[in-house]
Image (tube, coloured by chain):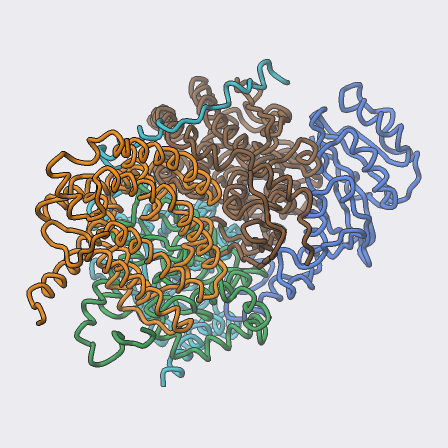
Chain colours: A orange, B blue, C brown, D cyan, E green
Amino acid sequence: MFEWKLALEAIGMVIYATFMGFIFMGIERKAMARIQRRVGPPIYQPIIDTLKLLGKKESVSHGFIYDFGPVFALGASIAALLFIPLANFQLFSSNADLIVVAYLLEVPMLGIMLGAMSSGNPYSAVGVQRGLLTMVAMQLPYGLALIAIAQYWGTFKLNSIVALQQLHGWSITVPALLLAFIVFDIVFQAMLGLEPFDIITAPAEISMGPMVEYGGKHAALLFTQHAVQLFAETAFFAVLFLGGASNLLELLIKQIAVLFIAIFIASIYPRFTIDQAAKFFWKWPTILGIIAVILAGW
Amino acid sequence: MAVTDNEVKNKVESTQKAPQDTQNAKPELPNTKEGRLVKELLEKAPYAEGSVRREKRIEFRVPAERIHEFLEIASEKFEMLMQISVVDWLKEGEFELVYQLWSVSESVHAFVKTRISRENAKMPTVMDIWPVAETYEREAHEFFGIIFEGNPRLGPFILEPREYEKHPLRKDFNTLSYVKTIYGEDFDRYDESKTNYVI
Amino acid sequence: MSLEVPRELREEARKHDMYLTPIAKDTYELFFGPQHMATENFSIILKMDGNRVEKAIVNPGFLHRGFEKLAEQRPYFTNIALLLRICVPESDVPENIYSMAVDEIVGWEVPERAIWIRTVVLEMARVSSWMFWIMGFGNEIGLYTAGQWAAAYRERLMRLFEELTGGRVYHIYTVPGGVRRDIPGDKWLRQLRDTVEYIKSKLKDFDEILFDNYITFERTEGVGVMDKRFALKHAVTGPNLRAVGVPYDVRKDDPYYLYPELDFEVPVLKEGDSLARVLVRRYELEQDLYILEQLLDMGPPSGPYMVQDPKLKNLPRFKVPAGDAYAHVESTKGDFGAYVVSDGSHKPYRVHVRGPSQSHGVTVLEELLKGARLADVPVILKTLDNCPPDIDR
Amino acid sequence: MTMPARVVGEEKVKLKKSFVKPWIGIKYLFKKPVTIKIPFEKIEPAPKYRGFHTLDWKKCVGCNFCGQICPARAIEMTWLEVEGKMEKRPHPKIDYGRCTFCQFCVDVCPTGALGFTESYILTTDGTEDALELFNWVPIHPDKVRELNEAYGDYRFPVVRIEKLGDGTYRYHLRNGEVFEFKILGYGIRPPKKPTPAKPATEATANKETTKPAEKKESKPAEKKE
Amino acid sequence: MGGDFISYELKEFKLFEPLFRWARKKSIWLVAFCTGCGGIEMPPLVTARYDIERFGMMPNPAPRMADLFLITGYVTPKTLKRIIITYELMPDPKYILAHGSCPINGGVYWDSYNVVKQLDKYIPIDVAIAGCMPRPEAVMDGIREIMRKIENGEADGWRRYRENYEWYRKNQDELFGEGWRERDAKRWLAWL
């Protein structure tokens, strides 16, 4: 039997997530503009941008994979979103959805890489190389942070993690998980592609990297994907460390809090080079992550 | 103060490589930093003529065939080659090359002037003394068509091949007529009488 | 296709703790510019080997307008409106060198007031150019915040320029024999002092966010290293030369205008890497603000702002005696010089401008880029402060 | 000439790197932006900003000093006929497709006829009719000043220049006034015959004036068909 | 994906046209290509003082996503090649704002052998503004004009380029010589 209610709910959630994701992007641009002492664009600007990109004509395609990449990325982002408990809503659930979400949040990057690689632009190729290396580099601290979480709460189920946090207090109140929080926050910066880890799309170096060949509707799709991804990642962050949420408003507040940390870091630090970033990831966040894991397992 | 007319105009003598040319130089070297510097260099290179123009500006005239030798000697005192300026003296049929040197240790600027014939202009490169001369020579080659023997990168540098072939900074290159052939006549709507317009 | 990595490349790699794998040498060509954020209409063709630049070929000429030819076809005064376009961010410098050279040929004693104004204008141009450089550097390394601030603060100087000269970017202000307009009044001087104070107070912000920043250090330390001999042989001037330990500053070594009477220091570092260049520039900005303060304390001398010469009655056909002269000033990019030859007519016989980027923007850049990482390319470009119109003219 | 303490010590130039200090920069999040919100706020250009030209036709003696000094040769002396009466002297016609706004022409003007205002905005679409605006004989300074005071947005005082067949130009000023004159010819010397027929001496100049217009008009038209 | 599933030209989607026009007007991305000396006024324009991001405009490093090309001043033939290629890379509703005197009639470089006079022979211009160089306010006025034209659907430079392609192509070939695309542009076409 097809569950109409659930399907509607899922669609509604995706739409809500996309919309809020766009607004988050707007907040990001606006807040950065304010730190830069200017007014900045209106908060709904990313929606207009996407709309405009949708209305553009595109005559160039670099083959099937090029078209498939953004779709693949968007699909993965939406899938990840549906695994995350957003307030009372969680479409899919499994025994180890922590790992599933963590994995699915990585996939979009691969999708973009896939498409970018087939565009044949050397800047894209360099961007892809950088993206893959960043991914490899951040896996280690990322994994360690997740292990610390799982170890402390003793479960891989996001639902249970939220429930346990509601009972025993948020994750960041635990010293071990505070370290994991810091580690995760650094990784988070790279996942969002913000400074100091916006190495993939470094405009002054490789002019947008993987996105250099994407324009028009492809770019609109990538924008949408980025919005969903932003929403999913902030939600994931909030669920893991800020005690989840019982309603969407609470979740929203937590997500925005998370976002602002990212914005602050992004607006005051320049960009690392790729080798420095890799070295950095394998140094401080890894050490902190290991300490967190050890403390959590104590 | 500036140099006088005849100094610039009567350049023909300087190309004759008579080392002890009489009219200029020696006795009037003042006993300053600059004067001593000129004296010192002239002792090593007697074929050149030297004079002090003003404070911190000295001037040498060197025959073209010994320019490399002279600059090699000069490079001990003058660490930097600031520029190679080419002046196209159309009437005399000569290019004047001015090597602008700067001495960091002495804070003196030196003009080393030499003249070569306009036709088939060739010079030895000074890349081995100052590697930066590569750029200057490429530029001089491009704009004037002087060939610097030994510079491997002569060719279109700033200009595109079509303009490069014309060597546009030569005095006999007429910009306006060239522009008309390339970009069409319709851009210039004005009369070209020299009495009405200075330009 | 050799499997051997060149020795200097290996050394460079060791310096950055990054060894190049000798296998699978995938070289490709990367066209860096002109449609690129880091290069302002300037192109570098990079032969890349993975993440490393194997060979760089500078391809200038996108901005070539043939100024030197055009200047031969225009009367002396008019050339000011043309030659200042050689250095766009600091357009007063070409004006001044040309005017100085013509002054020398004619033998004019420029009035004191004009000298004072010219000095102030040059220093203001330097400060605004530094602000512009901070912006560019910030954008290059990805710190947009500092760049935005710097560009905003620069607007104050632009406003002052506008009031003094009547133009925002192209001032067309310094002419042979003096300047074109008088100072608008004491209000302008007060505003200038306020602006100097304002920028001075904001320097701390830039220090905090940009120059003290951990990642700025990471990005610039040990990148694009020059040594002293190399720099001198390549005629590198300005802050780039001072960053390798040579205290050469035209304002000290060949003083012009009021600089002999002013008290300022020349920062010198020995490292010769990008970081040294950045720090030297930062200190010079401080010094320039200090110089402006001194000039304001001195106050403009009274008198005319233009040479009184009956020959100036017929400006279009104003003739200059035959002769030649070389004048140079210290710009933010380096030693900016002009060689003017006159044959006694109303147009210069030859004007040759020496842009500092000519020496550090071609061969030096090519050398420094060899073995640099791709991410270092904009950093090297910007710390050398390469200005494409200098090269192209 | 060298002064004491000319080289500053390294310790003064060098800085210490820091992870924490950049965080101070966030304080600007809560401060007022420095942006000038242009459509709502206005920036006045500085007094004596070098903008568009003005010309007092009464004062102009047609000496062509302005044309001689102009680095862009944007100035062209024009013989005009206002209300059926030919002006005694040629007047400069200025091409803003050439002008560099150096105002050397204003400096050399012996009678002070040529002047400039602070107006600087001239926005057109690139069509041929609109580009007529870029080539005008400046109008009287009082008129420009009056328009500037009325609107205060530093725009070009003329909205549209209508070019009629017989060399008549009609300036539509911003406040709706129309100003009409006829161009008889170009150059220093007066045209031989101030009639609609093309003067023989100025044939080349005249031909060249009209040529770009014809050419451009012909091209998109023929393509669009 | 590759097809025109929402094409502004298709009749059945005329319905969306006002929406897209509004979006295009509100979100104009610039090509980050300083073609001339006016490039010096681009940074003030996009930074804190004038901040055109208020109108949703921002410089974009990739021409594939850009809408507006600011021709900032004079254009040399060497740059014009890149400009043409960049312009052709931009996806279709695309606009050109010619900035300053030089693109209109050669400006102060009217007799220079290396500056293109009358740019609109080679690429279509939507809005031209006077000034040398124009103040940022003047550029913003030009931008407002282009927004107005986009809203009214008058900004049709791209369409003119498409329709008169042979004419433009002929002029370009006259300037650069036949086959310049194959000779020169092929090397950097893919990644310019």
Q: Point out the residue furthest to the bottom here.
A: D225
Q: Quadrant of residue A227?
A: bottom left
Task: Between residue D142 and residue C34, name the one nearer to us.
Answer: C34
Question: In the rendered image, which quarter contains the C terminus of chain B?
Answer: bottom right
Residue A51 visible in rendering: yes
Image position of E190 with respect to C371: above or below: below
Q: How many marks?
A: 0
Residue D153 visible in rendering: no
Residue B34, image x and y in percent?
76, 24
Position of E148 with respect to E86 (left or right) is: left
Residue A118, image x and y in percent?
44, 67
Residue D129, image x and y in percent?
34, 70
Image position of D135 with respect to C282: above or below: below
Question: In the rendered image, which quarter contains the N terminus of chain B?
Answer: top right
Image position of E53 with respect to A284: above or below: below
Position of D187 with respect to C74 (left or right) is: left
**Which residue is drawn at the image coordinates 44% and 48% (left, top)?**
A204
**Which residue is drawn at the image coordinates 15% and 45% (left, top)?**
A160
Task: Between residue E54 and residue C161, name the one nearer to us.
Answer: E54
Task: Between residue A17 and residue C351, name the one nearer to us.
Answer: A17
Q: Point out the residue furthest to the top here.
A: D4
Position of A11 with respect to A182 (left or right) is: left
Residue A200, image x and y in percent?
41, 51
**Which residue is drawn at the image coordinates 40% and 42% (left, top)?**
C142
